[in-house]
């Protein structure tokens, strides 16, 4: 699979996640402000940036792929 298809697949998976604010009781899922994806030789990682519409706190979630477990 090409790197472009991999990055699109991972970004779509991150967009499908339900993420709630860690700091306030805002009941609705927070939409992602930006997603960055980077593929490296040792694995790849994606960073998602979020801003809560209620408390206006901003945070980041980072997901790293370390490869298959054998």
Image (spheres, rainbow, N blue to C red):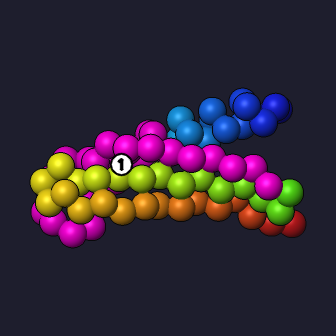
- Say if 1 sits above or below 67 in the image: above
Residue 26 left/right relative to 20: left
Residue 3 left/right relative to 56: right
Identity of the residue drawn at 59% across and 52% down: 46
Identity of the residue drawn at 56% across and 39% down: 11
The quadrant of the image that shows the N terminus is top right
Identity of the residue drawn at 19% across and 57% down: 56
Residue 28 in the image, given as x and y percentages of width and height? 19, 47
Residue 64 in the image, given as x and y percentages of width and height? 65, 61
Front one among 69 and 47 = 47
Q: Which residues are magenta?
A: 14-40
The quadrant of the image that shows the C terminus is bottom right
Identity of the residue drawn at 86% across and 57% down: 41
Tell whether position 10 is magenta. Answer: no
Label 1, residues with CA under 10 Å away: few <14, some 14-19, many ≥20: few
Quickly name the residue at label 1. 18
Tell whether position 28 is magenta. Answer: yes
Q: Total of numbered circles in the picture?
A: 1
Residue 38 in the image, given as x and y percentages of width and height? 69, 50
The answer to whether residue 34 of the structure is visible from this angle is yes
Residue 43 left/right relative to 51: right
């Amino acid at each position: 699979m090409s790197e472009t298809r991999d990055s699109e697949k991972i970004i779509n998976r991150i967009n499908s996640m339900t993420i709630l604010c860690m700091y306030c009781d805002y009941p609705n899922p927070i939409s992602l402000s930006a997603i960055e994806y980077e593929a490296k030789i040792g694995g790849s990682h994606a960073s998602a940036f979020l801003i809560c519409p209620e408390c206006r706190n901003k945070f980041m979630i980072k997901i790293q792929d370390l490869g298959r477990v054998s």
